Image: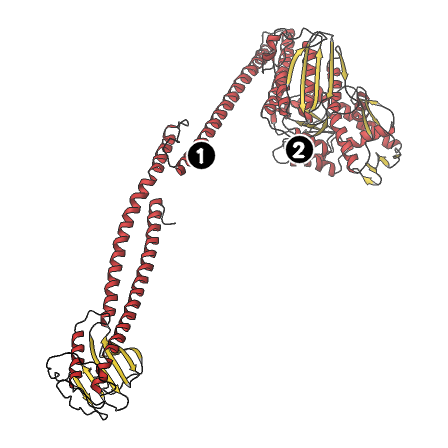
């Protein structure tokens, strides 16, 4: 748990410890990077507004350092751009301060459960790469490409594309996608799904793919077979 | 620039111009006058030489005798005045007396000599252009006789006659002007005059010109100083009036007054325009400051209430007398109040951003997709309300801020869900129109009376029928965001029975 405010850090730590988590804290970006390298956490809760390094930079460095565990970004309402940048840097979800501790716990639990399921699946049998025409989605290789060109997706974007591609031509409801990609069995009070969908579409458009992912209003999303 | 004063610049400029004119004119006048004087002197000398040529010829015994002037008797020439020399330079006597009736061509005519002397003397202290003629020399080509009349200076070689025309030469510190005329009858005549008078006149003229110039410059100096001060008086007046603005902060002062010269009037008018613009800006800033102060005061008041409640409940919870059930209730209440605080702070921040009028990250966004997500979130929050959404299959695409537009729809849906009929219906429609898009949210609740609609849009205002404790910021946020997107918020009655909120977005 990374936050520069001691009071918030302390109360959140206590709240999470009550839920049975072991919590290590850091008050700045450099400390967070050190701590992550030493203790290999199962999840990271990262405040965006840090005194030394921006949370987005910290998230990007953690991902570059090979950390694949969930990163949950905390931000203030007026830090929209930083929050979005944090998601682009590889964070999995965000919470806007002030939030209820229950909300944080629910998300962490879901993200950790999802990660554990994936780890077990990965250990048992490798998932074969998905190929749909020029689209190639390889979750285990952590890459997706269109016509040989890499899409440069973050972990959560890749998971989203994988879920859509495995269910091509099937309309997936929002709640179903939230469950498949984030492990949420509740609807989070955030625009995370819409935001990630926007990134995914932009990255597909950037390499020249047609509009593969359609919004079926009132229902959810569908990936059309290219 | 050293000359900072406008007066000084005008004066110096005028002086420079006048000096140039005076110096140029004076030099030209002096030069022209001197040239004319010299030409006149030459003509005078030539004429005199021509006039006395017959007499000279007579004395030298060349050509026909001139007409005898009727002179009764005669005086012998004064010594040194007239000399007649032979070819070798020896003096030969000049016979006195009247000329004989039939004089031979070779005999000198005494009467002629007298007439020549008289003519020379008559010239005297002449005021003719060439001044006094000092001497006359002549040579008879055939006989070689020479004639000297007047005072030939010592350092002039007596026998040498220069070839024809005018010569100016300096001898013994004096400037001489000599004219040699060759008459066809075989006589060469030279007249000599001092040239001093010409240069003296030129010097006198120069002095006059210089003094006239100096006096002229002084007059110009005084004149320009006075005129420029008078001409610049309106400008000084303007500066004085403008200076008063600084002292009193009175921006309503008018600098343009009738009777100002054109240039000053233009300046004054521009300054007046500037002042009025400044006045507007100051007024605008004061209004903004007032609005911000009121906002801060309102926000402070609104935040204090839930804070007070949190505080009181925490006091109960930590009190020794409270039983566990009371404690639990107090803490739950504090939690609810803290949620309310969160909503208020969220709303205030959103509102502040919307009211700042800042357009952030305007991109082409699909308003329909945003609405679809917002409807999903609202349905999750309010499963008891039937939320119906009527969206086109794709679009409308508008240019704007996705986050802000999300907040518009979220707040409208939240409002409808909270203040509509419990377990009722809410309908959202998004349509493209000519200039952008339209968002309409309706409910089947009690609605808002006509007279109250304007008020509820203001921040912290709540409708009379409002039962649930909202932040009182929802519609204010919607309006601020709508304005930020070049649109409006209108409230009217819905056919469903409740309120209809219509937001237009300009793309």
Viewer-closest of A211 and A223: A211
Viewer-closest of A144 and B19: B19
Chain holding disc 1: B
Q: Secondary structure at mark 1?
A: helix
Judge whether B30 appears above or below A164 on screen.
below
Q: How is the image coloured?
A: secondary structure
**On the image, which quarter does residue B397 sit in?**
top right
Q: Secondary structure at mark 2?
A: helix
Residue B208 position, x and y percent, is: 24, 60
Q: Residues within 10 Å of mark 2 (few under 14, many from 20)?
A: many
- Compared across the picture, whether B491 is left or right of B233 comes to right
What separation in Å lies between label 1 and label 2 (alpha carbons)?
53 Å
Residue linked to disc 1: B270
Viewer-closest of B333 and B389: B389
Circle on res. A55: 2
Viewer-closest of B244 and A128: B244
Judge whether B269 appears above or below B374 on screen.
below
The number of callouts visible is 2
Q: Residues within 10 Å of mark 1 (few under 14, many from 20)?
A: some
Judge whether B440 appears above or below B451 on screen.
below
Residue B280 seen in the figure:
yes
Residue A13 seen in the figure:
no
User: Is the C-beta separation of discs 1 and 2 under 8 Å?
Assistant: no
Q: Which residue sits furthest front? A: B101
Judge whether B195 appears above or below B28 on screen.
below
Quadrant occupied by the C terminus of chain B: top right
Residue B377 position, x and y percent, is: 74, 18
**On the image, which quarter does residue B102 sit in?**
bottom left
**On the image, which quarter does residue A177 sit in?**
top right
Chain holding disc 2: A
Labels 1, 2: front one: 1
């Amino acid at each position: 748990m990374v936050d520069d405010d001691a009071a918030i850090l302390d109360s959140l730590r206590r709240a999470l410890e009550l839920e049975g988590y072991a919590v290590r804290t850091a008050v700045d970006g450099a400390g967070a990077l050190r701590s992550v390298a030493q203790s290999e956490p199962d999840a990271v809760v990262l405040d965006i507004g840090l005194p030394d390094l921006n949370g987005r930079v910290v998230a990007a460095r953690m991902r570059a350092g090979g950390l694949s565990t969930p990163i949950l970004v905390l931000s203030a309402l007026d830090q929209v751009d930083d929050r979005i940048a944090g998601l682009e840097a590889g964070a999995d979800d965000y919470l806007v301060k002030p939030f209820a501790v229950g909300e944080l716990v629910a998300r962490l639990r879901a993200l950790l459960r999802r990660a554990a399921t994936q780890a077990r699946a990965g250990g048992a049998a490798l998932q074969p790469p998905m190929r749909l025409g020029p689209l190639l989605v390889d979750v285990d290789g952590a890459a997706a490409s269109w016509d040989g060109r890499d899409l440069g997706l973050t972990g959560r974007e890749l998971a989203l594309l994988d879920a859509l591609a495995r269910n091509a031509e099937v309309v997936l409801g929002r709640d179903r996608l939230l469950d498949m990609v984030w492990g949420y069995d509740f609807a989070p009070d955030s625009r995370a799904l819409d935001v990630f969908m926007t990134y995914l579409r932009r990255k597909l458009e950037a390499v020249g793919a047609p509009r593969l992912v359609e919004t079926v209003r009132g229902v959810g999303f569908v990936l059309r077979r290219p | 620039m050293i000359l900072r004063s406008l007066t000084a610049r005008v004066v110096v400029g005028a002086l420079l111009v006048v000096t140039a004119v005076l110096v140029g004119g004076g030099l030209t006048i002096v030069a022209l006058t001197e040239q004319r004087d010299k030409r006149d002197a030459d003509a005078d000398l030539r004429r005199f030489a021509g006039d006395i040529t017959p007499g000279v010829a007579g004395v030298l015994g060349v050509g026909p005798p001139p007409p005898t002037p009727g002179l009764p008797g005669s005086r012998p020439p004064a010594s040194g005045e007239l000399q007649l020399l032979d070819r070798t330079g020896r003096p030969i006597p000049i016979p006195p007396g009247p000329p004989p009736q039939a004089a031979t061509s070779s005999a000198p005519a005494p009467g002629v000599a007298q007439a020549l002397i008289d003519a020379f003397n008559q010239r005297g202290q002449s005021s003719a252009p060439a001044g006094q003629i000092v001497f006359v020399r002549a040579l008879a080509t055939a006989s070689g006789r020479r004639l000297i009349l007047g005072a030939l200076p010592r350092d002039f070689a007596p026998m040498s006659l220069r070839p024809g025309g005018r010569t100016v030469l300096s001898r013994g510190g004096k400037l001489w002007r000599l004219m040699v005329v060759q008459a066809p009858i075989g006589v060469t005549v030279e007249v000599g005059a001092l040239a001093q008078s010409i240069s003296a006149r030129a010097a006198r003229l120069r002095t006059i010109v210089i003094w006239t110039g100096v006096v002229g410059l002084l007059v110009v100096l005084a004149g320009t100083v006075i005129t420029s001060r008078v001409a610049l008086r309106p400008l000084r007046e303007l500066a004085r009036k403008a200076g008063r603005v600084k002292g009193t902060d009175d921006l309503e002062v008018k600098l343009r007054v009738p009777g100002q010269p054109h240039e000053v009037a233009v300046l004054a008018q521009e300054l007046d325009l500037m002042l009025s613009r400044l006045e507007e800006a100051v007024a605008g800033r004061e209004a903004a400051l007032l609005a911000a102060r009121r906002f801060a005061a309102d926000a402070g008041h609104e935040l204090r209430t839930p804070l007070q409640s949190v505080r009181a409940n925490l006091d109960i919870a930590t009190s020794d007398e409270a039983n566990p059930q009371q404690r639990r209730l107090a803490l739950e209440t504090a939690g609810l109040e803290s949620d309310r605080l969160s909503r208020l702070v969220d709303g205030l921040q959103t509102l502040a951003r919307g009211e700042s009028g800042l357009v952030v990250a305007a991109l082409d966004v699909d308003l329909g997709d945003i609405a679809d997500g917002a409807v999903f979130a609202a349905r999750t929050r309010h499963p008891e309300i039937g939320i119906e959404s009527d969206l086109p299959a794709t679009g409308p695409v508008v240019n704007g801020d996705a986050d802000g537009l999300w907040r518009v729809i979220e707040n409208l849906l939240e409002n409808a869900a909270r203040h509509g009929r419990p377990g009722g219906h809410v309908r959202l429609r998004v349509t493209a129109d000519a200039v952008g898009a339209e968002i309409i949210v309706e409910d089947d609740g009690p609605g808002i009376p006509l007279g109250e609609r304007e008020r509820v849009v203001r921040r912290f205002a709540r409708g009379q029928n409002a039962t649930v404790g909202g932040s009182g910021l929802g519609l204010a946020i919607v309006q601020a965001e709508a304005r930020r997107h070049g649109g409006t918020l209108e409230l009217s009655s819905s056919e469903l029975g409740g309120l209809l909120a219509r937001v237009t977005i300009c793309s």
